[in-house]
Every structure is written in structure tokens, then in C-alpha cells.
Image (spheres, coloured by chain):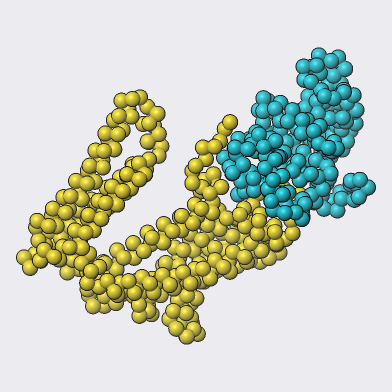
Amino acid sequence: MTSENKFVSGTVTGRFSTISRNSLRAGIVFAILLATLVLAVAFPDSPEQAAKDNNVFVAVILLLMVIYWAKIYLNYEKIVTTTDIFLIISSGLFLWELLLGKFALLDSFIFPGPAKVFMVFQTDTERMVDGVISSLGILFAGYFLALALAIPIGLYAGWKKRLFDVAYPIAKTVSPIPATVYLPYSIVLLPTFRASSIFLIFIGAFWPILVGCVNGVFSADPRLINSARTLGLSDSQMIRKILLPAALPSIFSGAMIGLILSFITLTVAEMVAATSGLGWYIQYYHQFANYDKVIAGMILMILVVIGVMNIFDRIQKHFLRWHPVHGEGENSASSH
Amino acid sequence: MVSGLRPPSEGSVLIDGARVKGPGTDRGTVFQDYSLFPWMTTFENVCFAIEHAKKTGERKDIEKTAQEFIELVGLGKFKNAYPGTLSGGMRQRASIARMFSMDPKVFLMDEPFGALDSLNRIYMQDLLLHLWSEGEQRKTVLFVTHDVDEALLLSDRVAIMTPSPGRIKEIIEVPFSRPRLRKDLSVDPNYLALKSHLLSVLYGEMVEEIEKQEKQLEVFA
């Protein structure tokens, strides 16, 4: 962003060279992806590799090209960032294919090339989809339960001094304890794995959201609260219309930490005790020493995380659209 | 105390004979730069205030009133903008629209133009005087300022307060007839005399304060 501005505000030649520099960098991304594609299609990993074993990998490379093109086409202002990210992704993919796929520098059983890994997405689709559905179901159930309880309690605790004095030290003490320590008891006490996982995620996400919420209310601008009090609001209106939005930026940062912890908790719980889900998928195939599927499981998990975080960001942007820092950045109405 | 945010340590505040017990919408308030809620647009801010001032009323009427006052202060184009995207002057205009739209008995203005540049301040003073004199009945305005010219231009009575403890030191009637024009006032000898009197009262206070502090320092030294 800043480097772009520096160029745009420069001379005509400066601007021109920025454009050609950007297209050069974009060209490099396409070149790397194309090279990976050629490598994948022209040279088989091993004599017994059939052409169709490459199908999914080829599709992935083409998909990356389309996504990259669409991103710079639709959002040209962000070309520098987009290109940087795609440079990293495409070079990583290229090196993976070259060093592990073609040259097999490391034991290709434990470190398979991308073609073998991406093939899993075709051969094991059903189990993967089931895993994603199962994991996301547990994640969202626990996470929304945590949101639904932590936000009202946090708002109230931040507002009432006495409750705050009690709740805040407790929350700060309990929140660093990993939720998975409750795993043995939650499995004994709750009827199913699903219920106990939901409970663990709830615990894991609850504390950071609570701390964020209490902090948000407690650090809300007292001048705004005074301004609200001159309107003669009731306690419930005060909490809903003033304290909640005032605390929202802090609630969102707590909710973000809560979401990350939920993911970690879920994966650990699944690796220990589940019979489906993303963590289970990786653990299960690890036991069979099927490293193609272990790595495919990791990639799947990364994709799910990207998706979920994307949704989170969109929600945050929508709710904090008024906020000068977190908002959409369409604050051009300023100055007269 | 007048806004009801803090109880008086002794005595009481009366408005039309009724005692002030807490914050209420019979007093409309404009603070220096934080009367508006940043998560509501200009329009939502004004609507929200009217809603709580009137308690009853159709949504349509509220929105119509809000629209009128926003246009009155010249923010029609910015009614859907969030305060964070407005300039300081625009924010204060929105605050004033909010205050007038609530139709309170008394206006409380706590250094409302303190954070504005001088041109904007002149514009806002004129706007305030205009809106105030246009009203059906001229409401009481309690206006806190540290600007002597502003005090003399706007007010009927000036109460000079001492810094900590904040007590009223002197109350001065401002005799000039309305409408007051800046260029007439600035050459009016009465105005100049009153201004120099005000300044000497304020300044005298400061000098005394400084001398007192110096004495204390001497004691320590």
C-alpha cells in the first residue's frame, strides 16, 4: 500500500515503471506456475506414474492461475500484495514438485511429491468432505455457544464494577489453561465424543471472548458513556446500544483468538479421541504410514482455515464498518 | 451537575422549579468532540437522540424531524456518513442538529467549538445564533468557553469561574442588542471596555494563582 502510493504520486515515468514492474512480477508468477505445469506433465515422477495420476495436480495449478488472474483483474489496487502471496505459493509448489516430485531428494514415501498428494483429493473425496463437515459442525456449535454466553456475561461484567473485580482475575487465570486438559473428564462425563468436543471448544473460546468483551466495556470511552447518559437510557438500552458497539472492536479481537484456539482444541481432541474429522483424518492415516493422505489432510485443513478466517474477516468488516481502523477503508467523505 | 451526571455536593439545581435528579433529555448536551456515537451514522445519531427525548412518536415522524435538522445544519449529503469520516466542524454541526432536534428545555454546551479552527468557529457561532433565534421560544443556553470574544458575542450573561475550586467569581450582564454583528461589536467602545474588564478578572485570577505557587516554591526552597 505505502510503496504503491509512493510510486503513484511520483512522476509519469515513475508511474509507468510501476505498471511495467507490476506486469513483470505478474509474469513471473505465471511463468513459475507454467514451469510447474510443464514439469508435472512432461516428466513422470517414476516410470510407473500414469498421465492421469497428474490430473488433480494439473487442475490445482490451472486453478491457481485463474484465481491469481481473477484477483488482480478484480482488485488491481492490491496487486503488489496479491503478487507477493502468489509468488510464495507458486515458488513453494514449484520447489516441492522439482525437489521432492522429480528429483526425490528425500524419501519419497515420507515426503511425497505434490501429484501424489493432490491425487488424494480425488480418491478420498468422500471421507475428506465428511471430515470437514464433522469438524466444522463441532467447531461452530462450540464457538457460537461461547459467543452467545461470553458476550452477554462480558458486557454485564464490564459494566458492573463489583462483578468485573471478580470476573476479570478469574478469566485471566483460567484462560491460558489449554481446554484439552479437560478432555479426560469431558469424555467420561458427556455421552458422545461430539458433545465433549463441543464442550472443549466452548471452554477454549469462552475465556478469550470474555476477556475481550470485559476489556472492551471497561475501556469504552467514558465521555461517550456520559453522552449516552444525558439521553437517559435504561440499563438494557445502555448495554445493547452503547456498550456493545463500543466494546465491539475488542470483542472481535477476543473472538479471533477464541477462533484460533477453537481450531487447535478441535484438532487435538480429534487426534486423541475422534472417529471422523480433520484431525482424526491426519492421525488415522499417520497410523497407517500413508503420508500422501497425511499431507493432503494438512492441506485440507489449511484450506478450511483460510475459508473460515475469510468469513470471520468479512463479518468483522461489516460490523466494524464505522471504525476508522477496522472498517472498509472507504473513509473518503472526510474534509469539506 | 446541570447535566445530572454528578450530584451537587450541596444545594440543588432547579430547572423551571423542578429539581435535577439525574441525566435527562430535558437538557440537550453538546460536548467538545464526542457527543456522537461513532457506530451510528449522522442520521442514526440524530434519530436515536429524538427517540429517547420524545419517548413516544412514530418512526416516520422521528425520521422526518431528523432529516429536517440535518439539512438545517447543511449535512444533508452526509447523513449516512459515520462520524469517523467527518471533519471536526461537520461533527459539531451534527451534534448541534442532534441537540436542537431533541427540543430540550435547556441547552448545555461544554466548549463545543474549542477544538475547531477559527474560521469554522465563526461559522458555527453564527449557525448556533441563527438556529437559536429562529426557535419558537428562545431556550436557555448554558455555554462553557474559554474564549472571551465568543462569550461576549453569544451571551446575555457571563459568569466567570475560578479554576479549582471552580466557583463563580463574578456575573456580568452583556448589554448589546441582538442581532449582534462582529464588525459592529469590534469597534464598540462598550464592548472593548467589557472585554478588557473580563480579561483582567480572568487574568488577575491567573496572576494570583501563579504568585501563590511561586510563594509555595519559595517555602520549599
Write down which chain is painted cyan: B
Residue at the (66%, 63%) spot, across then down: A156
The vertical placement of A243 against B66, above or below, is below
How many tags in the picture? 0
Q: Colour of chain A?
A: yellow
Nearer to me, A99 or B37 = B37
Residue at the (87%, 30%) spot, across then down: B156
Nearer to me, B108 or A199 = B108
Question: Is any atom of residue A257 visible in this view?
Answer: yes
Instruction: Measuring from the top left, give residue B120's x and y in whole percent.
Output: 67, 28
Instruction: Measuring from the top left, give residue A50's x and y in whole percent.
Output: 10, 66
Residue at the (48%, 60%) spot, across then down: A257
Instruction: Measuring from the top left, give residue A284's x and y in whole percent.
Output: 29, 77
User: Which image quarter holds the N terminus of chain A?
Assistant: top left
Nearer to me, A228 or B127 = B127
Residue A132 falls in image quadrant: bottom left
Q: Residue furthest left?
A: A47
Nearer to me, B166 or B85 = B85
Residue at the (74%, 35%) spot, across then down: B111
Q: Is residue A138 left or right of residue B189?
A: left
Question: Is any atom of residue B170 visible in this view?
Answer: no
User: Which image quarter holds the C terminus of chain A?
Assistant: top right
